[in-house]
Image (cartoon, rainbow, N blue to C red):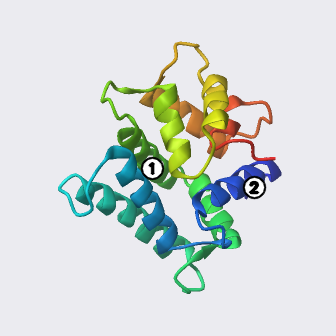
Amino acid sequence: MLTPLQTMKLAWYFRVYDVDDDGRLGLLDFERVIENVRVLHGLGAGSPQDQPLRHAFMQRWEALRDSADTNRDGSVDLTEWLHYWGAVIEDDDRYDSEVASIASLLFGIFDTDGDGVIGPDEFCDYYNVYGLSAALARQVFMDLDADGDGAMSLLELMDIVHEFFRGDDRHAPGNRLFGPYE
């Protein structure tokens, strides 16, 4: 069962994914994110580089829809989203599988210079793809960069992600992974 803090964070995370702000996650939300990432990377529609990106996001959408869309209306509402994440968080194997795959996918997409870390500009790109402000991204990045080295490795990101999903400490920096949730 989700704690009140987890519910608040996950409700905010839902709004981040709900790119068209209709209160439901659907195929169009994921297609808009794909398009934003494609433009960010300068990939032509249908280009060889576009195909793996599109495939990864479509796979993510289909897995979410198949697991969370309990009323089978082709979209995921907030109640379904929270129920889905409650089940994922409670199951260690499922949590490791699903959360690690999402974090790794996003890390790989946004490590645009391929140096094995996410810097502040790359973190801003991530926020921009979801329609969040660069100024907010820079502040959040500074909050999350615990060692102050100006970079976030995949291992550091996984720790932050763990704080976000499983943490219940209101003061943990990882709570702000997707911006202010309150």
User: Which disc, if any, is residue 2?
Assistant: none
For residue 137, above or below residue 16: above
What is the number of the mark on residue 7?
2
Q: In this rendered view, identify the residue nearer to me: 166 or 34.
A: 34
Label 2: few (<14), some (14–19) or many (≥20) C-alpha neighbours in 10 Å = some
> Label 1, label 2: how many angstroms apart (C-alpha)?
19 Å
Label 1 residue SS: helix
Q: Is residue 112 above or below residue 120?
A: below
- Is there CB contact under 8 Å for labels 1 and 2? no
Residue appearing at x 59%, y 38% in the figure: 162
Residue 152 in the image, given as x and y percentages of width and height: 49, 25
Q: Secondary structure at mark 2?
A: helix
Q: What's the amino acid at mark 2?
A: Thr
Marking on residue 102: 1
Residue 14 appears at what percent x and percent y? 64, 60
Say which amino acid is labelled 1: Ile
Q: Quadrant of residue 73?
A: bottom right
Q: Is residue 181 above or below residue 169?
A: below
Of callouts 1 and 2, which one flags the residue occurring earlier in the amino acid sequence? 2
The residue at the point 58 percent across, 33 percent down is 160
